Image: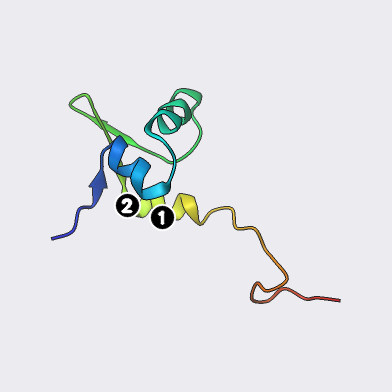
Amino acid sequence: MTKQYLNTHEAAEYTGFTAGTLANFRCRKVGCRYYKKGGKILYSLDDLNQWIKSDPVLTADSEGVRTF
């Protein structure tokens, strides 16, 4: 069974951000949505993946991009 939720350190490892950066995002109310249960911070894998994919940088090699 795969995990559906990650703690801050696991989410940091998964995303490549530091745990401190994720904490900073939470303080500033930016970044990925998170859940607070029993004093623990949890990130949904689905939310993390959606957040990561939310702002793609399109390049000339991106599908559907016209080059002139």
Three-letter code, disc 1: Asn
Three-letter code, disc 2: Leu
Mark 1 closeness class: few <14, some 14–19, many ≥20 residues within 10 Å: few
Q: Are marks 2 and 1 in contact (CB under 8 Å)?
A: yes
Instruction: Please provide percent x and percent y for residue 54.
Output: 54, 53
The residue lying at 46 percent from left, 26 percent from top is 24
Per the image, the residue denoted by label 2 is 45
Q: Which mark is residue 3?
A: none
The CA span between labels 2 and 1 is 6 Å
Indicate the secondary structure of the residue bearing disc 1.
Answer: helix
The residue lying at 40 percent from left, 39 percent from top is 33
Instruction: Please provide percent x and percent y for residue 35.
Output: 30, 35
The residue lying at 30 percent from left, 37 percent from top is 9
Per the image, the residue denoted by label 1 is 49
Q: Which residue extends farthest right?
A: 68
Q: Quadrant of residue 57?
A: bottom right
